[in-house]
């Protein structure tokens, strides 16, 4: 089996860093879509005859938005990834990708009482699992 390149590992690592802000990013993007002003074609001042269906229009706008699609897919992939992690891997995930206080791999090695070399092997294994979940391996 072919392993991951360093560029792919870095890309996956950066994606996982986005996880803890996904809900906020989705909410912000939906707010942006909700507050965007539509062009008013009704220049005469009378009623347009158009029946507004705001909930349906919002659903259509959200489902067609590329950013929201990306974020929801990322959230789904990471949630699936987290479900298959061992207890130790979940702890590593929490230390590295789940908060604003991100730890370096050296700090994680200290916190899980493991050598740096072993921690990097665990990282490699976790990123391979994540790549499989995403369909990259």
Image (cartoon, helix red, strand yellow):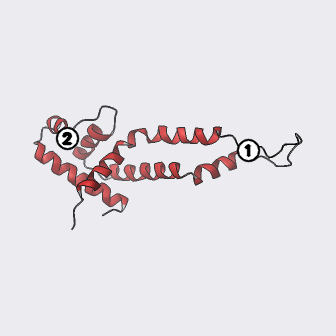
Q: Nearer the viewer, mark 1 or mark 2?
A: 1
- Where on the picture, by quarter, is residue 107? top left
Element on which disc 2 rests = helix
- Where on the picture, by quarter, is residue 135? bottom left
**Residue ranking furthest to the top:** 101
- Residue at position x 38%, y 43% in the image: 18
Measured from the top left, where is residue 33 in percent x and y? 61, 42
Measured from the top left, where is residue 80 in percent x and y? 37, 53
Question: Residue 47, which numbered label?
Answer: none
Q: Nearer the viewer, residue 1 or 88?
A: 1
- Residue at position x 68%, y 49% in the image: 57
Asked if the residue under mark 2 is in contact with the one under mark 1, i.e. CB atoms within 8 Å, the reply is no
Q: Which residue is tagged 1?
A: 39
Q: Which residue is tagged 2?
A: 105
80 vs 56, left or right, is: left
The disc, 1 or 2, on the residue closer to the chain's N-terminal end is 1
101 vs 56, left or right, is: left
Measured from the top left, where is residue 48 in percent x and y? 85, 46
Q: Dividing the image into 4 quarters, which one contains the C terminus? A: bottom left
Element on which disc 1 rests = loop
Q: Nearer the viewer, residue 39 or 57?
A: 39
Q: Residues within 10 Å of mark 1 (few under 14, many from 20)?
A: few
Measured from the top left, where is residue 52 in percent x and y? 77, 46
Q: Dividing the image into 4 quarters, which one contains the N terminus? A: bottom left
**Residue ranking furthest to the front:** 43
Q: Tell me the CA gap for discs 1 and 2.
A: 51 Å
49 vs 123, left or right, is: right
- Where on the picture, by quarter, is residue 7? bottom left
């Amino acid at each position: 089996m072919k392993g991951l390149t360093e560029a792919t590992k870095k890309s996956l690592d950066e994606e996982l860093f986005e996880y803890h802000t996904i809900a906020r990013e989705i909410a912000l993007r939906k707010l942006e879509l909700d507050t965007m002003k539509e062009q008013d074609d009704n220049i005469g001042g009378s009623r347009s005859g158009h029946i507004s269906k705001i909930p349906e229009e919002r659903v259509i706008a959200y489902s067609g938005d590329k950013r929201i699609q990306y974020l929801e897919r990322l959230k789904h992939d990471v949630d699936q990834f987290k479900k298959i992690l061992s207890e130790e891997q979940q702890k590593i995930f929490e230390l590295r990708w789940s908060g604003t206080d991100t730890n370096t791999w050296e700090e994680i090695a200290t916190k899980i009482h493991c050598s740096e070399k072993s921690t990097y092997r665990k990282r490699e294994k976790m990123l391979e699992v994540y790549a499989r979940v995403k369909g990259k391996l």
